Amino acid sequence: MTDTAIKLLSIESAGTLCSIAVAGFGKNAFISSEPGQKHTSVILGMIRNALQEASGSLDSLDAIVFGAGPGAFTGLRVACGMAQGIGWALDKKLIAVNNLLALAYRQINALKEEDSILVSTDARMHECYTAVFTKRGERLVERIPAFLSAPEDLVRHAEESNCSALCGNAFAAYTVEVPPALQLLSVEDANAEMLLVPALIDYGEDRLITPEQAGPLYVRNHVAQTIEERKKLKEAKSS
């Protein structure tokens, strides 16, 4: 885990894995759980346990980090809402981290200068959250913002974007066949610990936000059926 004197609490719940990381108190902590859709019932206890393990406290935090997405609608709202609640209660600033960027930073040492990496995670419903980042110095620059892609189009997107590498759990979830010209570096999903590297960069460059400014990154616009849509679906099934 990142070793830093900057005291951070990191919250990530965009996927099936809910995780908490605490850094900067001398002893770092990382806790993860797979509560399904019950993130709200476990996340407070996980934060409490992680702070206790790191010998830290909410009052001493320099900022609260949260995974802004893209990811599952409910999970994104849980992480963002929890970060906002703590921020409002204790007058703390927040750092919103793009989950795909966090995954890309995990692989930065495997990239050469100006190399591009396509990152893709499972969005369910046979879709993937996808973005492209390019290495410039010690930073990753977003070349193509997050968009929805079909799994069978991932390799084509990478080739058209002149990427040399790939990462993200979409490649395992959909058993994507990767040609030899592309390096599949990892099939991980993002977690709270991974958010810390881009969060520290944002902190150093004063890219912090207030709780009022915080919000999830939604890529899929149609996140839930309306009452009318559910009614029509029920009628169609019964006919």
Image (cartoon, rainbow, N blue to C red):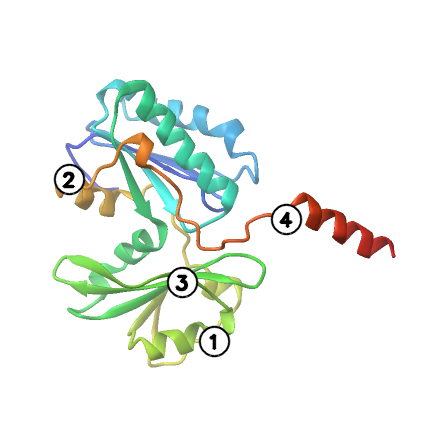
Question: Residue 130: which disc?
Answer: 3
As drawn, is 195 to the left or to the right of 176? left
Foreground mark, 4 or 2, reads 4
Where is the C terminus found, in terms of image quarters? bottom right
Identify the secondary structure beneath mark 4: loop
Q: Earlier in the sequence, mark 3 or mark 2?
A: 3
Marks 4 and 3, how far apart at CA: 23 Å
Foreground mark, 1 or 3, reads 3
Q: Earlier in the sequence, mark 1 or mark 2?
A: 1
Foreground mark, 4 or 3, reads 4
Identify the secondary structure beneath mark 2: loop
Label 1: which residue?
A: 177
Q: Is residue 66 above or below residue 111?
A: above
Q: Is residue 76 above or below residue 57?
A: below
Question: Residue 166: which disc?
Answer: none
Crowding at mark 3 (Cα within 10 Å: few <14, some 14-19, many 20+): many
